[in-house]
Image (cartoon, rainbow, N blue to C red):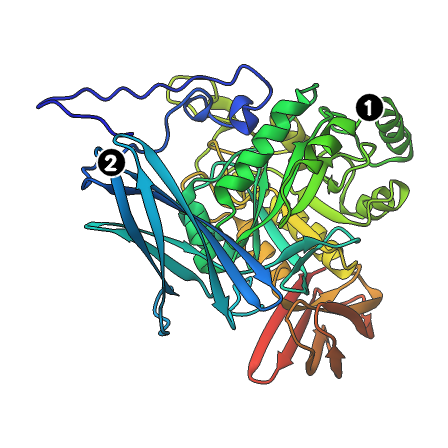
Amino acid sequence: MPFEPDAENELVVECRAPEDRFGGIHDTDRVPVERSVPGIWWGVDVTGQPDPFVVDVDLRPRATAEGATIDAAVEVYASESLDDRLTLTTKPAGHRRGRGMMDRASVSAAAGERAVVEKSIDVRDPSLWWPRGMGRQHRYEVRAKLGDAARTSTTGIATVEGTDAGGLRVNGEDVPVRGVALTDAAVADVDRAAEVNANLVRAHAHALPEAVYDACDEAGLLVWQDLPLTGPGVFDIARGQEVAERLVGTYAHHPSLAAVGVHDEPTDTFAERVGSGLVDRLRFRYRVWRSGYDRGAAAEVAEAVPDGVAVYPVVGEPGTDPDAAALYPGWDYGGVDDLQWVRERYDLDGAVGEFGAGSLPEGVDPAEAGEEGGPDLAGFDRAKHDAVVGSDDPAASQAYQAELVRGVAERLRTDGVPVAVANALRDAGDAGMGVYARDGTPKDAVESLATAFEPVQAFLVGASAGECDVVVANDAPETISGTVTWEAGDESGEVEATVDAGDRAVVDTIDVPGSASSVELSVRVGDASVENVYRL
C-alpha cells in the first residue's frame, strides 16, 4: 500500500492463526511445527514506484463463440488527481512470436485514490493452453502502461469442466488424470511431479504459492486446489463460501486451475488399521456404518464456487458418499487386493483423490523421534507402518511403499478410473507418505509410480503364474497402434494392438509358467518403447 517513507522505516508483518476451521493442513499435526499456523513462510518485498503507478493487472480469460476474451481489471494509484489514458498490449508469452494487440482505456481518479479500469480484450483465433501430453502450453502476456509505470500479467486460455464420471474435460477433451498430492508445496515439486509422469497436482487442504501456479502453467500441470478445510467437524458455510470465492478469484488467471475440493477427509474411520481377514472385513463394514457424515454443508459451499472449474465437494473415506474417494488399501486396511471389493461395495467408481502408503527415508530412525535433534515424524503414522512393514529398516519400508503404490495405481488405471491421485509427492516431515523425502531425495516409490503413470503403458493384471490379461492404457490424445511383447521365463510372445485415445483395452491373455521369476512387458509405438517388469 502507498505511504511516504522516512529515511529509516520499520516493517512489521503479523500473522494470526485462523480462529475457525479454515487453517487447513497447516493447522494439523501432518506438518512440522515450524510449518504450522500461524507462520510467515513467503517473502515480503518493498519496492519504489513512479507516481502514478500500476498496482495490479488482474486477468480473467474466457472462451467465446468468436474465439476468446481476456477481461482485464487494472488498478492504478496516483497521489495527485489523474485523467489520462492507459495502454494495454497483449501478445503471446514466452518465446512464441506473434503480433501484439493494443487497446486503450481512459483512467481518472481523485488524488490519493485507487482507480480500477476494466477492459475486455478480444483474442481472435486464440492458441489454447493444454495439459502436458495433450498439447502445448500457450499463454498470453498483458502489459498495462500508464506514463512511466507499467505492469505485466500472464494468463492462458482453457476451458475446464467436470464430467459425469468424476473426471476432467479440458478444451472439450476428456483428460485421464494421473495426479500427486502436495502437502507442503515448493516450486521444485512441479519438476518432481513431471518426473513421476503426473499431469495434475492436488494442493492438499492448503493454498499453493503463486510461484507454484506459475510453474504449473509453464509445465502443463493441472491444479486441483483444495480449500484449507480438513478433518472431522462442522464449519461455517458462509465462511466456506467466502474462502471458495476468494481462492478461485485469486488463481483464476492461471490456466492450470482445473478443480476445487471443499471438505477433505471429514471422517477418521481408520485412525487405527484394520486387517484383511473375514472378521476384519466385518469390522471394516461396522466402522463405515458408524461413521456418519452429512455432506450438505460441503455441497452448499461447492455451489458458491465460480464457474470455470470442476468441483469435488467431499474427498473422503468409504461411507461418506465422496465425490473423490480416499482409498488406502494396504495402509489403513487390508492389502491391494481389497481395493476392488471396497470400491464395488461402496460405489466408488469415480475419482480417487488420494491413495498411498508411508515410508522411511534413508537415515531416519523412528526410535529417535522426540529426542533433541531427532527426526520430526509429522504426517507419519508409526503404528500403521510397523503393522504392514514390520521393520524400521528404511529399505524394507521403501520397498513396501513402492510395491503398494504401484499396485494401486495400476489397478486404478486398468479399471479406467478418470482421476487417480497419489498421496503424496514429498514428505512434509522427516518421514511420511511422500515418494520423495522431505529434502527431495527420491525414494524407491518414485520409479514404481513413474512406471505406473506412464501415459502409454502395458499392465499385467493379477501378476502371478497362470493366465493373466495384458491391458494397455492409452492416455495419449490420439489412437495408438503398436506392438506389445512379453517374456516370462522361457515363454514369450507378441501381439499387434490398437487402443483409442484415453482408453484401455485387453490386448492379450498370456499363460505365465510357474517357473518364471518375472514377466517383462513392452509396448512399442513407432520408435518409442516403454517397458514394465513384474517380479513374481
Up/down of 23 relative to 503, above or below: above
* Circle on res. 81: 2
Q: Is residue 259 visible?
A: yes
**Which residue shows up at 31% across the image and 31% down it?**
113
Q: For the residue carrying disc 1, how many other residues have a C-alpha within 10 Å: few (<14), some (14-19), or many (20+)? A: some
**Which residue shows up at 51% across the image and 47% down it?**
443
**Image quadrant for the C terminus?**
bottom right
Q: Nearer the viewer, residue 137 or 365?
A: 137
Residue located beneath label 1 in the image? 291
| Rendering quarter of residue 209 | top left
Q: Is residue 132 visible?
A: no
Type of amino acid under label 1: Ser
22 left or right, relative to 509: left
| Secondary structure of the residue carrying numbered label 2 | loop
118 left or right, relative to 346: left
| Secondary structure of the residue carrying numbered label 1 | loop
Q: For the residue carrying disc 2, how many other residues have a C-alpha within 10 Å: few (<14), some (14-19), or many (20+)? A: some
Residue 27, x across and y down, in percent: 53, 22
Q: Nearer the viewer, residue 152 or 46?
A: 152
**Which residue shows up at 81% across the image and 66% down it?**
514
Task: Give the CA distance from mark 2 to mark 1.
Answer: 62 Å
296 left or right, relative to 204: right
Q: Residue placed farthest to the left in the image? A: 7
Mark 2 or mark 1, whichever is nearer to me:
2
Residue 202, x across and y down, in percent: 58, 44
